Image (cartoon, rainbow, N blue to C red):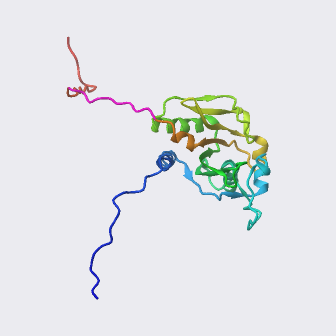
Amino acid sequence: YKIPATLPPLSKTTAPSNPIFKIEAKLKNILSNNGYNEIYNSSLVSKSLIETCNLVPSDHLRLTNCLSEDLEYLRTSLVPSALQNHANNKGKTSKNINIFEIANVYLPQSDKKLPNEISTLTFSSNTNILDVKSILEKIFIQLNYQNYNFTQPSSSNKTYFDPQNSADIYLNNELIGQIGEIKTSILRSFGLTETISMVEINISKIENLKPVLNFQPISEYPDLKFHITASSSLSI
């Protein structure tokens, strides 16, 4: 028998893209263009790392068949891993350590066995909070989000942020995250002596907020440009 040389039929419809992936890609480009390096950490952390950041292990989901004590709990925050990254890179460069991570955190749900997965952005630097805040404002501007503000002190009770140097981040009157400096006691536990400022944002909340797009129509008349040199003289 001769098999006909025909291609299999292809579907003309494509799977719908997840809009959160577009936001994540934009965030990665903006942070990379501003000198931040992307990091990838495991979604599983150890009990000691959780307790070092004053978090409670019982608030995390624990694997019953974990392969190692270092990979025992599903993380509910990206901050502990970021602080461990700062500690691992301490003294290896004379420049500021600017890092960011975009990944899911896993929040336990009482009525379900599976956790609630939330896309989260954390970026940090061993500098003061104002420098990190300026990067955050650049993100909002480039994403065309104009209605943003900061409320100090933060009401989130994050155990790793200094209450006197932290704030809640609001976008279109929606709480999306926190910005702050890490507590000195926690930095000491990681062997860090420099100030670490960090931003933690819930990307899933940004997805539902529409940006403000400003349109400026093209002028009906051509531009008139004048070039006046230093040697030019004007007489009246």
Q: How many marks?
A: 0
Q: Residue at x 73, y 68 (%)?
A: 67
Q: Is residue 11 above or below residue 179?
A: below
Secondary structure mostly taken by the magenta-highlighted segment of the chain: loop
Quadrant where the N terminus lies? Answer: bottom left
Pick the residue in front: 22 or 229. 22
Pick the residue in front: 172 or 86. 172
Q: Residue 156 at x, y = what percent?
A: 70, 35
Q: Residue 202 at x, y = what percent?
A: 60, 42
Q: Is residue 166 above or below residue 46?
A: above
* Residue lying furthest bottom: 1
Q: Residue at x 46, y 38 (%)?
A: 143
Q: Residue at x 64, y 42 (%)?
A: 198
Q: Residue 130 at x, y = what percent?
A: 61, 34
Pick the residue in front: 210 or 177. 210
Quadrant where the C terminus lies? Answer: top left
* Residue lying furthest top: 236
Q: Residue at x 29, y 83 (%)?
A: 3
Q: Is residue 215 magenta?
A: yes
* Residue lying furthest front: 1
Residue extent of the magenta highlight: 211-220
Q: Residue 13 at x, y = what percent?
A: 36, 57
Q: Is residue 32 magenta?
A: no
